[in-house]
Image (cartoon, helix red, strand yellow):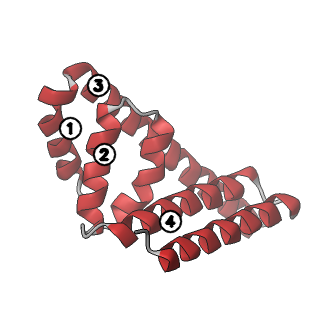
Amino acid sequence: MPDMSAQASLLGAVQSAAASLEAAVRDGLPARAVFERLRDTLANVVAFKVLTVLKLDPATLLLVRLAALAAVDAPAASYLMHLGPMVESGVKVDQVQDVLVAVAPIAGAPRVLSAATKITEALGITIAVAEMAAEADAGASME
């Protein structure tokens, strides 16, 4: 039987996130800020739901998800959603590489290579957003 208090908490978190995103758009926040809120909100909601059910530590859970993303040939956006939580939970690059090597015999080399490419894409997006933010901050401080 599902835990009703966990479901109610999840519903409350989703409703709060939706209101926050609507306010961000309505207030004219830059697209980058809205994107970051959406990404963080989705990651938090998904993590909350899973952590209320499972007994895995966050790093292990994220590594299992990475394996699943590689197996289903997920888009770069799926990896992007997991980058922040992976960094926060202490997942290391060598652990990511180990997971991809471990699933290659089952998922297949083409999917693993595709996953590596999409992870690189997601990292590139993250770096580009960080650079844009740094440039915006530098421009704002010069004014």
Q: Secondary structure at mark 3?
A: helix
**Dot 2: within a 10 Å radius of its alpha carbon, few (fewer than 14), some, or many (20 or more) residues?**
many
**Relative depth, front residue between 95 and 132:** 95
| Cα–Cα span, label 4 and label 3 | 27 Å
**Relative depth, front residue between 3 and 138:** 3
Q: Position of residue 62 (x, y in %)?
A: 31, 56
Instruction: Give the amino acid type for the residue marked by disc 1 in the picture.
Output: Leu
Within the image, what quadrant is residue 72 found in? top left
Dot 2 or dot 3, earlier in sequence: 2
Dot 2 or dot 1, earlier in sequence: 2
- Residue in the image at 78% along x and 63% along y: 24
Does the residue at mark 2 contact the one at mark 1 (Cβ under 8 Å)?
yes
- What is the number of the mark on residue 111? 3
Instruction: Give the amino acid type for the residue marked by disc 2 in the picture.
Output: Leu
**Relative depth, front residue between 3 and 61:** 3
Residue 91 visible at all: no
Residue 113 visible at all: yes
**Of all residues shown, which one is farthest toward the front?**
1
- Residue in the image at 12% along x and 38% along y: 102
Task: Write down the residue under mark 4.
Answer: 44
Task: Write down the residue under mark 2.
Answer: 66
Does the residue at mark 2 contact the one at mark 3 (Cβ under 8 Å)?
no
Q: Is residue 64 above or below residue 119?
A: below
